[in-house]
Image (spheres, helix red, strand yellow):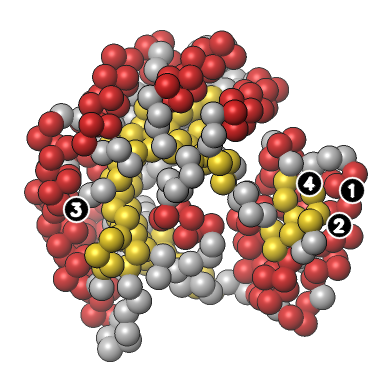
């Protein structure tokens, strides 16, 4: 079993670019918490006498899990432990915003069992944070990160590049700060304009420039070079880690392991079936109150399983292992088809074929999704 994901659907304020599921009202926080605890119990009961696989990771995402009281985090972890065999050395990550970093919370999370923090820094520049409508400022970004490191050396931070005011020089300064602070893991995302977000509206009303994809590509190439020079492994397209500091939870997703998601909008996967909770706090609470798990399901066909494998594995440092792909459907003869289809990208220097494995080059990573979908099985 890969692990358990817990979605906390509350945020202090709405970041302009965000399309995750969250509410800025904490009015129904207690009802949500009661529903979450009950969902864990209902799911466990529904599994019946099936032997449960050991849980290697727990991940609190959102939303902003650091908005909860540390006692509430502790109660959720206790509930998971009550219903699942959690490994004693399980990785337990909590996403936190820099404005929530205070000594009481850091100590409380540790006591609850959290052993890895994921901090949503995004930028160390005030004007960028304001443009994103982040709840924290530039001073909190650096001071609270340093403070968090004193209690949680196992830390990861998020940064965003390709924002309108982010010059290559500012981007360099952001990344240099991470390297200087010896942050062991970071996730870097190109700004994307998701439909119906405030950013989407701002661009349509000409209140903000649109995304410059050439600048994003340039900043991604620079990022890869800077972090490679600083000793980070680029182990997934958006993720970089010092040796021994890869995210175990996210790595499990990329290895196609099973996971269970709890909370509104949370997704689950058992290798063949994917299911997801309703992305609405009230409907979620109501459904659980009526003892009904609020899920929709999709059973993946073999073709979908193969395409998902292509998409995910091409994004990783290990690349696409053709024998593993072929094992999903030994009859399909897929290996030769993919090799033939890959040649044109190999000739353009976008991927390498090493034995039975296909790996994207740095330039290929700029077009990862496009190459993956071109290799998809019909
Ligand atoms: S804090 Fe995170 S989840 Fe909440 S609005 Fe901002 S980006 Fe989205």
Among the two numbered marks 3 and 1 on one chain, the one whose residue lies closer to the N terminus = 3
Among the two numbered marks 1 and 4 on one chain, the one whose residue lies closer to the N terminus = 1
* Quarter occupied by residue 138: top left
Please give the name of the residue rendered at 32% of the width and 21% of the height, measured from the top-left corner.
141
Give the numbered dot on residue 113: 3
Please give the name of the residue rendered at 89% of the width and 52% of the height, measured from the top-left corner.
343
Mark 3 secondary-structure assignment: loop
Q: Residues within 10 Å of mark 3 (few under 14, many from 20)?
A: some
Residue 21 horizontal side relative to residue 341, left or right? left
Among the two numbered marks 4 and 2 on one chain, the one whose residue lies closer to the N terminus = 2
User: Can residue 207 be seen?
Assistant: yes
Q: Nearer the viewer, residue 222 or 228?
A: 228
Pointers 1 and 4 in contact (C-beta within 8 Å): no
Q: Nearer the viewer, residue 161 or 350?
A: 350
**Residue hosting label 4:** 351
**Disc 3 residue: CB within 8 Å of ligand 1:** no
Pointers 1 and 2 in contact (C-beta within 8 Å): yes
Among the two numbered marks 4 and 3 on one chain, the one whose residue lies closer to the N terminus = 3
Mark 2 secondary-structure assignment: helix
Q: Which label sits in the foreground, 4 or 2? A: 4
**Residue hosting label 1:** 344
> Distance of mark 1 from mark 2, alpha carbons?
7 Å
> Distance of mark 2 from mark 3, alpha carbons?
47 Å
Q: Please identify the quadrant where the C terminus is shown.
A: bottom right
On the image, the x and y values in percent for residue 167 come to: 57, 12
150, above or below 79, in the image: above
**Residue hosting label 2:** 341
Pointers 3 and 1 in contact (C-beta within 8 Å): no
Q: Which label sits in the foreground, 2 or 3? A: 3
Among the two numbered marks 2 and 3 on one chain, the one whose residue lies closer to the N terminus = 3
On the image, the x and y values in percent for residue 260 come to: 37, 65
């Amino acid at each position: 079993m890969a692990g358990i994901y817990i979605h906390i659907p509350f945020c202090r304020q709405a970041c302009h670019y965000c399309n995750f599921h969250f509410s800025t009202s904490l009015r129904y926080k207690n009802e949500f918490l009661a529903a979450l605890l009950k969902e864990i119990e209902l799911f466990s009961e529904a599994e019946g006498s099936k032997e449960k696989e050991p849980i290697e990771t727990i991940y609190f995402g959102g939303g902003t899990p650091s908005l909860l009281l540390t006692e509430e985090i502790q109660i959720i972890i206790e509930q998971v432990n009550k219903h699942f065999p959690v490994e004693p050395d399980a990785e337990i990550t909590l996403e936190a915003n820099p404005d929530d970093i205070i000594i009481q919370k850091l100590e409380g999370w540790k006591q609850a069992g959290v052993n890895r923090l994921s901090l949503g820094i995004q930028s160390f520049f005030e004007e960028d944070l304001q443009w994103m409508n982040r709840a924290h400022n530039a001073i909190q970004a650096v001071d609270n990160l340093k403070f968090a490191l004193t209690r949680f050396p196992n830390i990861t931070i998020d940064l965003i590049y390709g924002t309108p005011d982010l010059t290559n020089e500012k981007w360099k300064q952001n990344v240099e700060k991470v390297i200087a602070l010896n942050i062991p893991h970071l996730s870097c995302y190109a700004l994307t304009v998701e439909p119906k977000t405030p950013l989407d509206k701002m661009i349509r009303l000409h209140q903000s420039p649109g995304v410059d994809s050439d600048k994003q590509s340039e900043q991604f190439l620079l990022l890869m070079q800077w972090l490679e020079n600083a000793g980070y492994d680029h182990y997934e397209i958006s993720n970089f880690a010092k040796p021994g500091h890869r995210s175990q939870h996210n790595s499990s997703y990329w290895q196609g392991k099973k996971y269970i998601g709890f909370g509104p909008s949370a997704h689950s996967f058992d290798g063949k079936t994917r299911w997801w909770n309703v992305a609405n706090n009230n409907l979620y609470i109501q459904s659980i109150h009526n003892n009904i798990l609020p899920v929709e399901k999709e059973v993946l066909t073999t073709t979908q399983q193969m395409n998902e494998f292509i998409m995910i594995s091409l994004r990783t440092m290990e690349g696409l292992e053709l024998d593993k792909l072929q094992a999903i459907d030994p009859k399909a003869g897929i290996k030769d088809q993919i090799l033939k289809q890959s040649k044109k990208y190999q000739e353009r220097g976008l991927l390498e074929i090493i034995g039975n494995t296909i790996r994207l080059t740095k330039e290929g990573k700029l077009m990862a999704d496009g190459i993956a979908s071109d290799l998809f099985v019909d």
